[in-house]
Structures are given as structure tokens and as C-alpha cells.
Amino acid sequence: MQSTSRHFNSNARKGIADAKLQAALSKLSHGFPVKRLAAMARLPEFEALRDDARDIKEHTLANLGTYLEIYEAKVLESGGHVHWATDAADACEIILGICRDVDAKTVTKGKSMISEEIAVNEYLENNGVQPIETDLGEYIIQLRHEPPSHIIAPAIHLSKEQVAETFRGEHRHLQTGRNLDEPRTLLEEARGELRRKFIAADVGITGANMVIAETGTSIIVTNEGNGDLTQTLPKTHIVIASIEKVVPTLEDATTILRVLARSATGQEMSVYNTFSTGPKRPEDLDGPENYHVVMLDNGRSKMLGGEFHDMLRCIRCSACLNHCPVYKAIGGHAYGWVYSGPMGAVLIPGLQGLAETHDLPGASTFCGKCEDVCPMRIPLPRMLRSWREKAYAARLGSTKARFGLAAWAFLARRPSFYRPIMAFGVGLLALIGRRGRFSTLPLAGGWTASRDLSAPEGTTFLSQWKRGKR
């Protein structure tokens, strides 16, 4: 998809002003976060599993080249093919080449963030191959020509009424007066439309939550079973994965699976955890005749061992999005690309460069909740702060913001100026504050537009502390 991250500020304002989006986002706090807490309570060793999962990924990243070579050898041993893609253009060209080799006209797709990252749908369409999204959320947004707004719930920004409107507009061959008032009827209609497309597809494309070096296996995690139909019915199965998705062993993979679903949706395990190893063998009843894996770099190798190395541990569970107050205020589309929330604000600058994405790291209150809930213990606030420092050093961002920071830094380094000026400002705000709160305040409109600002009590912390020592 085409990035609009450089328009983050205007995107965010649109999101805040969108009443339908705000209604949809208001439900997020009562869904995944609550279920995650319940799932943790049922598993006393959850925190220990987080440590184990983190250590597995760290060990793998420290030996990434070795495990990728082992994985490739195992895939080849099973009869499959591995293709190495430096960037999105390489990956799309490889995928199109595989489709042309089997004269593919249609491709069914399981949900894959990497396929969104490389914009493979648009590339295939422009070259005469029709891609069909089969995850319900992805199918809905494909009909609407929209990008996903969430990692695991791509249509979370929509109400069922909007989905029904979309189905009536796109499924015009069905009865106009049919009942689409309930989620179940919407699901049944999508299932009916997709069933024949599963059967007719020439190629199936899936992502991979992990690939296993020990066995040459790819793993997909779904709740709908669409991934299984995508990879077993067509004669050719293409797996798209980024290089950091490799793990050493089956045991390592199961450890990570134990924290993945609990962190993402609050489930003990996702409904379908599907392991695929190579093409169909003579004794197999079903499966693809051709098995291809496209391993994508697209900037990841540059992050290895550097300041943002820890981001490569991410397993795309979306826990940081589900708990982020900024994401819950503006939605995923505001971030302007495939990824969103705290993980997107760290990852997108690393993959696309800071010049176009410097506003994203500012989309954080630094409450620290993202790091608290991350199953891989990724220090997201530290990396967001680092991107902010780099943006400031590169003189990126608004002149007003830079001037404000420079003025504050000038005062903060000079206590003899800072203390009396702050004391005057705090005293003035306490004097003019009505009933202890401000509903409007000059230079703070971005805050008071959606919430009141508490008025100070009248003196600074330092002055109170000095009085307490006497």
C-alpha cells in the first residue's frame, strides 16, 4: 500500500473527528485487553513464558544467518523452494513469476501483513492476476478498497451496518431484501461468496507467524480456517515471511504460540495453528503440488544489532495497539501504512526512513503500557524516544515544536531562571483556573479539545518540598 505516514497529523485529526470510527474504537478497551488479563490469570507461568519467548528470539537474531541457512536446506529437502527478496519489488516480481509459471488467473490469500507491506495485491492486479482476500476482515476491506486498520482485526474500524452496506453494494447478484442485520448473517454471506473462490483458485498465498529451521515448516495462526483452505486447495502454495520470523525448533515455536494468542485475543490458543512442511507427498490426501517460500528482508538486516534491534522480536500480536491510548483515539489508518500503534511508530521509520515518518514517534504518551503488555518485552518507549531524538537532531518536524523544546531546554539548564518562571506560571494558572480545571487554554487546544486540563494547586513541587524540609 502507498504510505501516507508523512500526513500523520492530518490523518489523526480526521480520525478524531470521525464519529463512526470513534464509536468503533470505544469498544476496544472492553474487548482484547480484558480477555488478555483473564487469560494471564489462568496461566501462572505466563511471565516466565514471556522471558523464555524473548530469549528464544534474541538467540535466533544473534544467529540469524545460521538459522536461515538451516531453514532453507530443510525446505529444499522436503521438495519446496526458497526465494530471497531484498525488497518489496523483488518479492512482488518473484511471486508474479511463480503465478505465471502455473498460468494462474486467481490467487486466494490468507491474512499477511508482509503481503500488505509489499503491496502484492496491487502488483498482481496490474499484471492480470486477481487476488482474493479470504480472512473475513481483509475480505471486507478489500471490497471497500481500504488498508487494514489493525494487525489482527483489520476491519475493527467498521460497524456491522457499514459492512452490511458494503456487502449490498458488492454482492448485487444476491436478493436485495436479505437480512444482514446480524454478524452471523454477514459471516454466512461472506462464506458463501468465498467458497467457490477457494475451490477455483490457482495459487494460494499465506503469511507466516513463524518458520521453523529444524523442520523447514511454516506456521499460520487463524480463527477462521481460511488459511488452511488457502494453502491446501490450490496446486501451488506461496508463503511470504520476513527474515526475522525464523525460530530454531518446534519446541521454540510452541513456546511462542503460548504467549501469542493470549496476548492478542485472550484465547488459550487460536482456533487453527497450522504447520506446513513442503509440497504434497505421494501418501498425502491433500495439499499443494508446489511449495514456495519468499523470505523478505526489506530493511530488517539493517536493524540487526543496532539501536532498534529489539523491534525484530515482534510477533505481531497487537497487544501494544490494544492498550495504547493514542491508537484508541485515532485508529490505525492515521499511521498511514501497514503497521500502526506503538510497534508501527517504531518499525515504520526503521523500514521507510525518518524523513517521511518523523511524526509517528510523537504519537505516544510514554505511559509505558505497550512495554508492560508486550509478550516479547520489547522496550517500545525507549525506541520511540530515540526516534524523537533523531528527528530533533535532523531538524525534522514543525518549527513551533522545535522552538518550544529549545526554549524549555534553555530554561531547564538554567535553574535560576527556570524556577521563578515556572513558579509564576503555575501560580497564574492556579489563579485563573475555574473549579480546578480548564476546558480551554491558549497553546493547549490539542489537549483541551478532548479533555479538561487540571489546574495546579498554586505552588510548584520544588517550593512545596523546600517548605516540607523546614
Image (tube, helix red, strand yellow):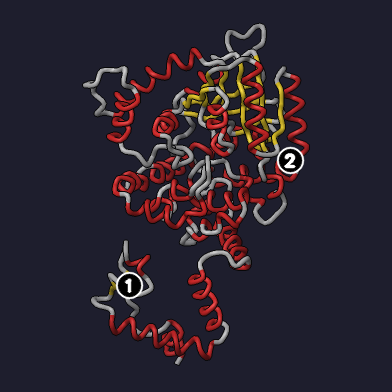
Q: Position of residue 170 (x, y in %)?
A: 35, 25
Query: Looking at the image, which residue is at 32% across and 74% down?
Result: 441
- 121 w.r.t. 330: above or below: above
For this orientation, the residue located farthest to the left is: 177
Quadrant where the C terminus sits is bottom left
**Inter-mark Cα distance, 2 to 1:** 50 Å
Front-most of 23 and 108?
108
Residue type (three-letter) at the residue carrying disc 1: Ser
Q: Position of residue 306 (x, y in %)?
A: 70, 54
Front-most of 411 and 60?
411
Q: Position of residue 120 (x, y in %)?
A: 57, 32
Residue under label 2: 64
- 73 w.r.t. 21: above or below: above
Are there few (<14), some (14-19), or many (20+) residues within 10 Å of tag 1?
A: some
Front-most of 196 and 400?
400
Query: Looking at the image, which residue is at 57% across and 53% down?
Result: 346
SS of the residue under disc 2: helix
Query: How many callouts does the rendering have?
Result: 2
Front-most of 114 and 128?
128
Location of residue 9 (image quadrant): bottom left
Q: Position of residue 287 (x, y in %)?
A: 59, 14
Residue type (three-letter) at the residue carrying disc 2: Leu
- 362 w.r.t. 405: above or below: above
Residue under label 1: 454
Query: Looking at the image, which residue is at 63% across and 46% down?
Result: 312
Q: Earlier in the sequence, mark 2 or mark 1?
A: 2
Are there few (<14), some (14-19), or many (20+) residues within 10 Å of tag 2?
A: many
SS of the residue under disc 1: strand
Residue 271 lies left or right of residue 95; in this view the side is left
Residue 372, can we see it? no
- 254 w.r.t. 3: above or below: above
